[in-house]
Amino acid sequence: MKISISLPQRSERGYTIDIGELPKVEIDGKAAVITNPKVSGLHLRRLLERVEARELYIVVVPDGEEYKSMESIEFILDRLFDHRLDRHSTLIAFGGGVIGDMTGFAASIFQRGIDFIQIPTTLLAQVDASVGGKTGINNRFGKNLVGAFHQPSAVYIDTYWLKSLPEREFAAGVAEIVKMAVMFDKSFFEWLESHDLKSDDNLKEAIRRSVELKADVVNEDEKERGVRAVLNYGHTFAHVIENFSGYGSYLHGEAVAIGMVMANELALAMGILSEDEAERIKRLLLRYDLPVDYRIDSAERFYEQFFLDKKSHDNTITFIVAESIGRYRILKSPERELVLSVLKKFERGSDD
């Protein structure tokens, strides 16, 4: 199955998302596979059976969100220069969202920009991170604050890689699937309520529907100036959680699950979302053992961290909330006291 990203706003070429068994990938020139020890140990041999290039190098970087840093980018770039890659070379991101983001960012700045291919190996990366061209790294101020929009030349989604995925990593990907359904497709959400994604056929269908929704959004708004911002449902809260926890306690999808629940609390406080639908969303997340609660030390400090998010502008904060399942609302800078009242429900010692 093939899904197209056409990028109608630009003359630059689009690309294809290929869902199914990884085909033969032929690269005309030098290439480097960027991966981590876990993925390379499990799957590198199978990948190398399917990738051909004039010269092919392997670059292994440490695993984990805490390594999504400028130091890792410099390590990758040094290896590319060591192997004398050039402007006609290609990078291959072979791993989860962290590897995809770093590989894309390295490709965007090496020799002022070279091609890269996404071969995502986690569910979260397959349904979200590998599609759309967002690349970047974290720093001490927050998540993905340094980066670039740099579209891949192709994306290959093969569920074979998911067979070795730990339960927590699988659930983290489910959170992003739920996000897409809550924002854009009520019938898809209802389908998720009645289908177990541990079934291979159901999982493939959920990936297909998620990628189609993401592709539609990216085709309409590549640079997040409009509808693409809706994909940040739960993320404004999640990025603060990840930053405060040092990028080690929660997987990204786990933080997004908590963030969606917090965003729902904001929508409930504004009378936008019904209690019943908020509970349905929480119930679906809990079915996959995703965390739905988080304890804040200081609501004031948590609130101030929002202003370091990429989506903040001129000292205003944008929140994405569910108006109902399948419908969204973009909130431009809701009242500070209202947001604080929601955050205080999550403070340590709160009875709520």
Image (cartoon, grey):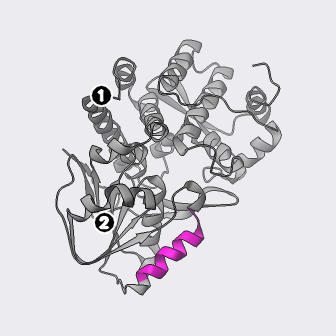
- Residue stretch rendered in magenta on the structure: 68-80
Q: Main secondary structure of the magenta part?
A: helix
Dot 2 alpha-carbon crowd within 10 angstroms: few under 14, some 14 to 19, many 20 or more: few
- Please give the name of the residue rendered at 46% of the width and 35% of the height, measured from the top-left corner: 171
The image quadrant of residue 184 is top left
74 within the magenta span = yes
Q: Quadrant of the C terminus?
A: top right
The residue most toward the front is 41
201 within the magenta span = no
Q: Which mark is residue 199?
A: 1
Residue 26 vs 279, above or below: the answer is below
Which of pointers 1 and 2 lies earlier in the amino acid sequence? 2
Q: Quadrant of the N terminus?
A: top left
Q: Which residue is mark 2?
A: 12
- Real-space CA distance between mark 1 and mark 2, rounded to the nearest whole angstrom: 38 Å
Residue 134 visible to an observer of this rendering: no
Dot 1 alpha-carbon crowd within 10 angstroms: few under 14, some 14 to 19, many 20 or more: few
User: Tag 2, which secondary structure?
Assistant: loop
Q: Is residue 269 left or right of residue 99?
A: right
